[in-house]
Image: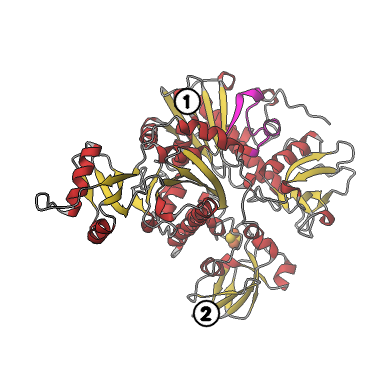
Amino acid sequence: MPKILFKPTNRSVDIEKGDNLLQAAAKADVHINASCGGEGTCGKCKVVVTGDGYSSDNRSKLTAEEIDEGYVLACQTTVLGDLTILVPLESELLGKSRGKIKTLTSTLESWNEQLENLPLDPKVFKKYLELAAPSLEDSVSDSSRILRRLQKDLSATDIVVELAVLKDLETLIRDADWKVTATLVKESSHYRLVRVENGNTASRQFAIAVDIGTTTCSGALVDLNKKEILFESSEYNGQISLGDDVISRMVFAKKGDGLQLLQKRAAETIDKLINDLLKKNGVEKNDVDLIIVAGNTIMTHLFYGVTTDRIREAPYVPVFSFGPLVSGDDLNITALPDAKVASFPCVASYLGGDITSGVVASGLIESDKLTLYIDIGTNGEIVLGSGSDWLVGCSCSAGPAFEGGGVKNGIRSIDGAIERVLIERDTYETVFTTIGDKQAIGICGSGLIDLLAELFLSGAIDKRGKINQDLSTDRVRKTPEGGWEYVVAWSQVTGIDKDIVISEVDIDNLMRAKAAVYAGITTLVEGVGVEIGEIDQVLIAGSFGNYIRIKEAITIGLLPDIPNELYKFVGNGSLFGCAKAVIDQGVLLEAGKITANMSYQELSADNKFMEKYMSALFLPHTDEGLFPSVKFEK
Ligand code: FES
């Protein structure tokens, strides 16, 4: 078997002859940017190879200089023998910056206030029991002794005992002097006894809520007895190395053991979140019995290790809508192998559990207001509804541009990311701020929205997103590939020893992303026969959504031009929905009803959507009358 050594990490892996270098890197847990999932189209997986044991055909994304220097595309390079691979900085930048993403904690207080009002009715719960010891008059079996008491306390007749409980019961119950804590799972028609512990542990009941985002996974530790989120944490989804967006991941899942690798990466990411949450709060693993996750349909399928092949092709059919209740062990969750794992149901292939969770959590169905709920992430998911009378949803592929993918210097919201940009109107000089006041290493989503708005308002780009080549500034220049770019930050002030730029290709990707979201919103709204002006409120969800500045988002035509006060940020609604569901299992049942009642509008087959998308590929739009508040300044 050929051995591949990766530099500078010095990780090595033995792989099959014929595998490619991207697969080798995935197996060695070496991060290489792979936006297109190994299709050979993004050109992000550049590495330098030493040794003869390879063949690499597709070099179309490499410059002549790079080819001379030994660069290859990892995904297009087949391994034939031992190799040493250097992963250059630009190919591992996203991996290097994997650390913690900035999370807003300001919403936590308001979330906890809302959790207080929920009934405590978790899917998995503990019950402390003080039992009488057996006697000649009362010699029922140990398990029957427990069940008899539980049946009385819970007014339930049907309680099933898991085999694992019986195996240890004889010693445990006597050591405990007949004072034990039972852990039960509440199924639809019966209870299941899954654990018996020595003494009273019922005061320690915790659960984990997880939002599995395409880019970012967020977790929350919930104290069930207090009905309170103790801590929230985020990690990049470890699947990023295997594709930036859901389409690339599905492409990767089809290759060899791609599906298993994606499942493993999701599980590893959730493991990291759980370990972080428990460690920071001093909570024992034994006291966590329940994990509830929500993700888009593709993330949910990949987490369960179920194929996504049919989701990619018309008529776009997922394998399941309701994920089964399983154990952590079944899904490679090593941090909590015995915990029960449940998930929010998905509406359709491109409208997932993150939306059902977010909609339940937002209170949309309890409000009479005509509400637009937008979850802006790599996939834009949009729901319009009024109370529980009607709900209609759609999904549009915004792509990862607003999260840093498909943009040369795009990065996620981490320290050093340019998050706010101003362009001097006379000199075209830039003023910017970075997250954490660190040296700039790239531009995150809110920075890109600001930048696009500023470039447009200052006249540095036109309505089509084309750079004005006649500007008297050296910030506008030709790229080596022959296109044009604008220098946002000179190398002297960046932390990557290179200029941070935005090119016309980047702008084009951002325009496509914003056009898809806007076209999705307007197609959905008009499809149900209402006007944008009739909307009473717009709820912006998603961890990325927290950072968007509404005025700039309207300026570029991402969001409809309606009064700012109608917009409300709800934070990571999907995560909040999971937190609610671990406390009250009725929330999951409610989500099931939403899944059944929500109409899904498939946009990929909708000509109106395509027309609207084409019209939205301008700044802010071909029809300026739709954006009266946007004032072109130059
Ligand atoms: Fe290799 Fe995109 S070109 S992952």
x%, y% of residue 151? 21, 41
Q: Magenta stretch: residue 533 in it?
A: no
**Where 357 sits versus 135, above or below?**
above
Where are the magenta residues, as a range? 547-570
> What residue appears at the point 52 percent right and 57 percent down from the top-left corner?
272
Q: Residues within 10 Å of mark 2 (few under 14, many from 20)?
A: some
The amino acid beneath tag 2 is Pro
Q: Nearer the viewer, residue 88 or 510?
A: 88
Image disc number at residue 12: none
548 with respect to 380 (left or right): right
The residue indicated by pointer 2 is 2
x%, y% of residue 300? 43, 48
Residue 562 visible in the displayed image: no
Sequence-wise, which precedes: disc 2 or disc 1? 2
Q: Label 1 CB, ligand 1: below 8 Å?
A: no
Q: Nearer the viewer, residue 530 or 390?
A: 390
Residue 74 visible in the displayed image: yes
> What residue appears at the point 68 percent right and 30 percent down from the top-left corner?
622
> What residue appears at the point 28 percent right and 50 percent down from the top-left corner?
179
Q: Nearer the viewer, residue 29 or 308?
A: 29
- Residue at the extreme left: 137
x%, y% of residue 324? 33, 47
**Where 601 sits versus 409, above or below?**
above
Q: Magenta stretch: residue 564 in it?
A: yes
478 with respect to 201 (left or right): right
x%, y% of residue 110? 55, 32
The amino acid beneath tag 1 is Gly
For ligand 1, which image quadrant applies? bottom right
The residue indicated by pointer 1 is 385
Mark-to-mark CA distance, 2 and 1: 57 Å
| Secondary structure of the residue carrying numbered label 2 | loop
